[in-house]
Image (tube, rainbow, N blue to C red):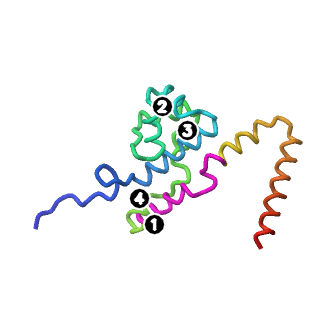
Amino acid sequence: MARGRPKAEYGRGTGRPHPVDVHVGGRVRMRRTLLGMSQEKLGEAIGLTFQQVQKYERGTNRIGSSRLYDLSKVLDVPIGFFFEELGDWQSAKSSGKARAFAEEQADYELDPMAKRETLELVRAYYRIKDPAVRKRLFDMCKVLANAAEESDD
């Protein structure tokens, strides 16, 4: 019986990015969007094309440590920011929960808090200088959301 390397579940040749790479890329996209920065501007700041930034944000390409350092400087966040809310990949992997972890990361894309619309809304909200106007807008949103929930019932 020949013993070889076990077949990779993620990465090159599998057609599936590693869930950690997807998570880190999503955090890059979230921070870039919150700052109102385009993929092109981010790419220029770190010496990449916007297509390369897209691949990082999707998790298609892995982000090396030196590039992650550059991203943390340009996006003005500590390196740990990119791994926040990740959970414990190693314990999930060793306890046989790797597939559930991957599905959880895939669900990240469906999370309304990860959507571009949400990030742009939050950014626009905090650009409103007058706290009283912000508060009225917040109250209006809550009223509209409650009305929508009541009409669904």
Which label was assigned to residue 90?
4
Asked if the residue at tag 3 contacts the one at tag 4, i.e. Cβ–Cβ closer than 8 Å, the answer is: no
List the residue tagged with mark 3: 78
Q: CA distance from mark 4 to mark 3?
A: 22 Å
Name the amino acid type tagged 1: Ala
Magenta-colored stretch includes residue 104: yes
| Disc 1 crowd, CA 10 A, few/some/many (<14, 14-19, 20+) | few
Q: Residue at x 43, y 63 (%)?
A: 92
- What are the residue bounds of the magenta stretch? 98-117
Q: Earlier in the sequence, mark 3 or mark 2?
A: 2
Closer to the camera in the image, 57 or 65: 57
Name the amino acid type tagged 4: Gln
Q: CA distance from mark 1 to mark 3?
A: 28 Å
Mark 4 element type: helix
| Dominant secondary structure (helix, strand or loop) of the stretch shown in magenta | helix
Q: CA distance from mark 3 to mark 2?
A: 11 Å
Q: Residue at x 43, y 34 (%)?
A: 67
Q: Is residue 84 left or right of residue 2?
A: right
Where is residue 111? Give x, y as percent: 59, 57
List the residue tagged with mark 1: 100
Q: CA distance from mark 4 to mark 1?
A: 13 Å
Q: Earlier in the sequence, mark 4 or mark 1?
A: 4
Q: Earlier in the sequence, mark 1 or mark 3?
A: 3
List the residue tagged with mark 2: 70
Mark 2 vs mark 1, foreground winner is 1
Magenta-colored stretch includes residue 75: no
